[in-house]
Image: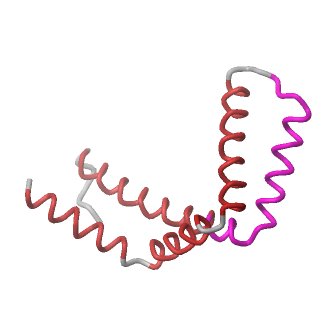
């Protein structure tokens, strides 16, 4: 078990040393330091999540709700700082997904990692 922890710690350090992680961390911190933009993104994520759940349950959205989310989306797309963060987050999550895929390969004996 200690060897697994050691290897996991090494993997964590390797990930933190990537440009992908450093960019993600930089843009995340910058966005956190901008309450207006971080609030806008947070508001969008909450609203979009609620609307998505309602749609999935078969509920029809009111035109004003669709317009509100469209306006917020447009504003987000116009904010370079938010878009830099979202792009960096997507890259970082892609890296984490690749690690997860390799773990699954090992778990299911689909072949050696790598």
Instruction: Give how far across and how far down residue 45 sits, in percent.
Output: 66, 46
Residue found 68% across the figure and 54% down from its top: 39
> Is 68 part of what is drawn in magenta?
yes
In this picture, is 100 found above or below 18? above
Instruction: Give how far across and how far down residue 70 sits, in percent.
Output: 85, 47
Residue found 37% across the figure and 73% down from its top: 16
Split into 4 quadrants, where in the image is the C terminus?
bottom left
In this picture, is 100 found above or below 80? above
Instruction: Give how far across and how far down residue 62 sits, in percent.
Output: 88, 28
What is the magenta segment's predominant secondary structure? helix
Residue found 41% across the figure and 59% down from its top: 96
Q: Does residue 62 appear left or right of residue 82 in this picture?
A: right
Instruction: Give how far across and how far down residue 50 sits, in percent.
Output: 68, 33
From the viewer's side, name the closer residue of 43 and 17: 43
Q: For residue 84, what is the image quadrant?
A: bottom right
Residue found 32% across the figure and 57% down from its top: 102
Which residues are drawn in magenta?
Answer: 60-85
Report the number of numbered marks.
0
């Amino acid at each position: 078990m200690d060897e697994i922890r050691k290897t996991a710690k090494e993997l964590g350090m390797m990930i933190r040393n990537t440009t992908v992680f450093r960019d993600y961390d930089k843009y995340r911190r910058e966005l956190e330091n901008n309450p207006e933009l971080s609030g806008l993104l947070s508001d969008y994520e909450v609203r979009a999540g609620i609307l998505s759940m309602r749609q999935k349950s078969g509920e029809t959205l009111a035109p004003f709700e669709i317009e509100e989310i469209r306006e917020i989306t447009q504003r987000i797309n116009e904010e370079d700082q938010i878009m830099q963060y979202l792009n960096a987050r997507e890259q970082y999550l892609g890296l984490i997904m690749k690690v997860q895929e390799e773990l699954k390969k090992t778990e299911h004996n689909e072949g050696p990692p790598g």
